[in-house]
Structures are given as structure tokens and as C-alpha cells.
Image (cartoon, grey):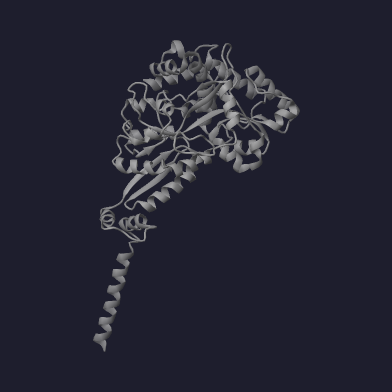
Amino acid sequence: MKKVLAIMICLALLAALVLSGCTGKDTTAGKETMEATSGNTSQTTQKVEETKKGNIHVSFFTGKTETIDFINEVINKFNEQNAGIIVAQEFQKEASNVIRVKFASGDVPDIITTYEQEYVDQGKYLDLSGEAWWSRLIPSMKDSCSDLKSGKQYRICTNMTMAGIFYNKSIFNELGLKEAATWEEFKNNLKTIKEKKPGVTPWFVPGKEAWSLGHLIEFLPHGVIKQKYGVLEAKKAFLANDQSKLDFGTVGGSMETFAKKMLELKNEGLINSDVITATYDNHVQEFATGKAAIISQGMWVLSGLLAANADLAKDIGFSPYPAYLDGTKPVVLSAEDSGYSITAESQNQAEARKFLDYLFNAENQKNYSELLKSPCAFTDVDANWGVLKDEVNGALARGINIGFTNEKPAGFSGDDAGRMVQELLVGKYTSEEFAKAYKDAWDKGIK
């Protein structure tokens, strides 16, 4: 009996050890196998072999806050359908600065949504010129994605976007205000709102996220250069750092005048007093609830506004940025949006392409376009993106159409420029000092 009991105890211990090894709870390989096969009821021999060899991890790096949940949903579906490949999203608010660190450290993502000309020049992006995706894209959007120097395409956009002034129609109608074509008209509108509706912020600026203030630089002082010289010549001037055209440090130039006017608005209480700590979410809520009369944003903000207040759709007006320098005209951003690149250093380029193929399918892009309320750049996608179609078309007709400043130096990103505006608004610079500091930072970034 003792021998039988001993044998039974040994067998029980052996079974426990086998079961423990099979669960894989404490091993990376076991965890990856479970993740790779999740959602699949059967596995082919090939997939089983791939799982045995280990999963391929594809990193997706972005700074686009509005699309985090949507991209995660697409990623989850893709991972379920593609055993052996695991895509994971990384979001960073200051993506243009974080990617600089990643490139320098060798921690390079496979797919990225940040794009800088200097990184093109350094060979950081994979040449996508031969991809089949282009046959589906609106030709003008392919042109927008083309590198000025080589004529090749290192990124592909999926949408078109516009940015300008969003204003509350009900407030404007109540106060008898009209869209501003000049900065003087714009400032007078703000003064009227402050005087007659003291509980409403005339212009709510979300200054905590540096990129938002960086956009003001791209649309206003850079907008002067873009309309003065045209798209092609402006791009050349940015790339060559041609200060005879850029004029960044000159008193009375586009940059110094921008800084002076922003300081005037702050000192006269025409923008929110908490501009440096106010977040993107704050300005969405303030505008959606009627506590802010004006914000500066792109079409990407619409989904958040309507989620906060579905009844707001009828009250949203959209207009170009007012001309703030003598001799110039109002401008409105009309540009490529949602651009994707594969890094040249990626070890998973085939898998990255496979994921982008999935992301770019017509169903996903229809959902994406309707989520962002932004027109799709693919010709085979019919999306009801919506509520501001007429407003946007009107603004595009009334203002000079400009694009993003993709030619800025990687050593001086849009986030860096935004931080300088933060410093301006807390009193570090006079307008003249700001213009000089901006030029010095741009020059240093180029070098």
C-alpha cells in the first residue's frame, strides 16, 4: 500500500508540473502564442509554424489624439485575422519631438504618422512610390505627398483637411457680428463679445499642447509667405532657409507682427487667461457648451465637438483666418491629412505594408472619414463626412488656400515653435525678441 501511495503522489506531482508548463503564464512565448491565436477557431500548419518561431511585432507611432480609439479597433481586428503579426499603437502628444529621440536612439517604429523634410533628406522613410495604393488616390493628394526634391512619395495620406476659424453662429447673430476678413475686424469682434457677453471667452486658445500653438505659426506668419510666393516657391524658400523671403527676424515682418498681435489679445483679455494650462479637451468643451465664441482648429475637431454636443451642428460657422499683415488676404488650410510612412530602418516592412493595406480598405476609410468629419482622399470611398460641407466650401472660396509647413527643419519642430509661443505668452519675449529667437531657432534647426 505504501508503494502504491508513493507512486500516486509522484504521478500527481508530475501532472502538476506538466500542466504548469503548458499554461505558459510566466513565459513570453506562451503569451504571444495566446495573443496571436486569439479569435481564430482553427490554425493552418503554416500559422502554427509561424507562432512557434515567435510573433512579429509591428509598432504604429502617432500623435493624432482624435483617432486613438479607432486605430486600436482596426488593430485589434487585424491582429485577430493575422496570426503571427501583432500591431501595437503608441501615442505621444508631442510626437514630432519624441520621434526625434527615437530616431537618435535606434528605437525606430515601423509605421509613423509624423513627417519632416529633414528626415526625408536623411533617408529615414521608405520609398512608397511604387505602391498600388496610389491608383486609388485623388491625383492632387498624390502631388501633396510628393517630395519636392526627388519627386518620390515617402508617405500616403488618406484624407483631406481644412483648418480655420470656428465660430458660434448663434452668438454672432445675437451680437450682429460678421466673419472677419481683416485682423482689425477680427479683434473688434472679440472686443464686442467680451463687452456684451462677459461669461463667454471671445477666443479660447488651448496652449498646453504645444502643437496647437505651433499650428498658429504655420497658418498665420507662415501663411503670409505661402500666399505671397505660392506653394512651390514657398516650399523652396523654407527648404533653402531663404531669409530674403522668410523674413523671420525682421521688425514689422510676419513673425514679429504675429507675436505683437498675440500679446495684444492676451493683455486685453480677448483670449482665455489660462491659455498656457488650457488643454485641447478644455477648448472642445468650452466651445461645445457655448462658453467660447471662437476657436482655431481643423476638421479633425468636429467629431469631438459633436460628441460633446450633438445639437451644436447648426451653430458652427467656419471661416478663413483673417489677414493680419497689410497687403495680405485671408487664408484657409486645405491640405493632405492623416499621412502614413514606413520607416527605412523597419525590420518588418512587409508586415507594415500588410497592416496599411488593411487600414486603407474602403470600409475602414469610410468609417474613418465619417469619424473625423473629413473628406476621404480615396476615390473608391463614399463617406458622409458632413455637417460643414457648405461652410468649408464657402471658406475655401473666400480665402487663399495654403498647406502645412512640412519643410520645417527636424531640429526645430512644430512642437518647438509652439513652446516658443507659450514662452511669449508668459512674458519671456517682447515681439521683437520673439522674432529674433524664432529665426535663431530655425537657423539652428537647419544646421
With respect to residue 21, does 425 lie above or below?
above
Q: Which of the image's four quarters has the C terminus? A: top left
Residue that extends furthest to the bottom in the rendered view of this protein: 1
Residue 93 makes an appearance in the image: yes
How far across and how far down the image is residue 425, in percent? 58, 25
The quadrant in which residue 60 appears is top left
Total marks shown come to 0
Q: Which of the image's four quarters has the N terminus? A: bottom left
Residue drawn 64% across and 23% down?
Answer: 265
With respect to residue 163, does 372 lie above or below?
below
Q: Nearer the viewer, residue 55 or 378?
A: 378
Residue 272 makes an appearance in the image: no
How far across and how far down the image is residue 280, in percent? 56, 36
With respect to residue 373, does 438 lie above or below?
above
Q: Is residue 106 left or right of residue 228?
A: left
Residue drawn 72% across and 28% down?
Answer: 173
Residue that extends furthest to the left in the rendered view of this protein: 3
How far across and how far down the image is residue 187, in percent? 66, 21
Residue drawn 37% across and 47% down?
Answer: 87
Q: Nearer the viewer, residue 28 or 178?
A: 178
